Image: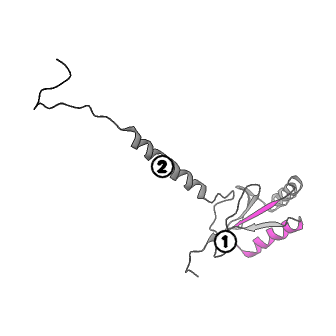
Amino acid sequence: MSGISPPGSTVKKKARIEIIPLIDVIFFLLATFVLFTLSLNKSQGLKVALPQSSTSEPRDPAGSVTISITAEGTLAWDKDPITLDEFLLRLERYKMAEPNPRILINGDENAFFSQAIYVFDEVRKKNINKVFIETKIRPPGSS
């Protein structure tokens, strides 16, 4: 018998998985994942409820230190909780080690204003002029 079947008979075909559409789907998922991770706002500080601002601008946290002020009043250097004395020591070391220092203040919206002023004062005493306050973008139409 040759590979030809007589007329009227049914021939069972083997099921095949088409790989080209699967590759398209995988590349689409990969591109979506990459774009999503690039759009994330990477914070080096503790997770706090940031205040909202309608004039927020994206910032690049690379090459900067994030000082977090929690609602309970504690400070953190990047993600490391610190005391006020440790804050002063680390600020001094950072100023000496970094020729172009940048500070991001990551304050909880329920933190006391006096704590943020204390951080600002100490940073300004060290002549660090690049100080940024992290906020989240206020949705349009909300007050």
Q: Is residue 17 above or below residue 141?
A: above
Q: Is residue 57 magenta?
A: no
Q: Position of residue 121 (x, y in %)?
A: 84, 70
Q: CA distance from mark 1 to mark 2?
A: 30 Å
Of residues 103 and 122, the one nearer the viewer is: 103
Residue 103 as seen in the image, left or right of residue 28: right
Amino acid residing under circle 2: Leu
N-terminal label among 1 and 2: 2
Q: What residue is shown at x 87% (from left), y 55% (from top)?
A: 99
Amino acid residing under circle 1: Ser
Q: Position of residue 86 (x, y in %)?
A: 82, 57
What scheme was used to colour the molecule? one colour
The extreme top residue here reads 1
Residue 37 quadrant: bottom right
Q: Position of residue 111 (x, y in %)?
A: 69, 72
Structural crowding at the residue carrying mark 2, measured as other residues with C-alpha within 10 Å and reported as few (<14), some (14–19) or many (≥20) = few
Q: What residue is shown at x 18% (from left), y 24% (from top)?
A: 4
Quarter that holds the C terminus: bottom right
Of residues 106 and 128, the one nearer the viewer is: 128
State how many labels appear. 2
Residue 118 quadrant: bottom right
Q: What residue is shown at x 80% (from left), y 61% (from top)?
A: 102
Q: Position of residue 135 (x, y in %)?
A: 66, 69
Residue 23 as seen in the image, left or right of residue 1: right
* The disc label shown at residue 17, or none: none
Magenta residues, start to end: 100-125
> Which residue does the numbered mark 2 point to in the structure image?
29
Q: Is residue 115 magenta?
A: yes
> Which residue does the numbered mark 1 point to in the structure image?
56
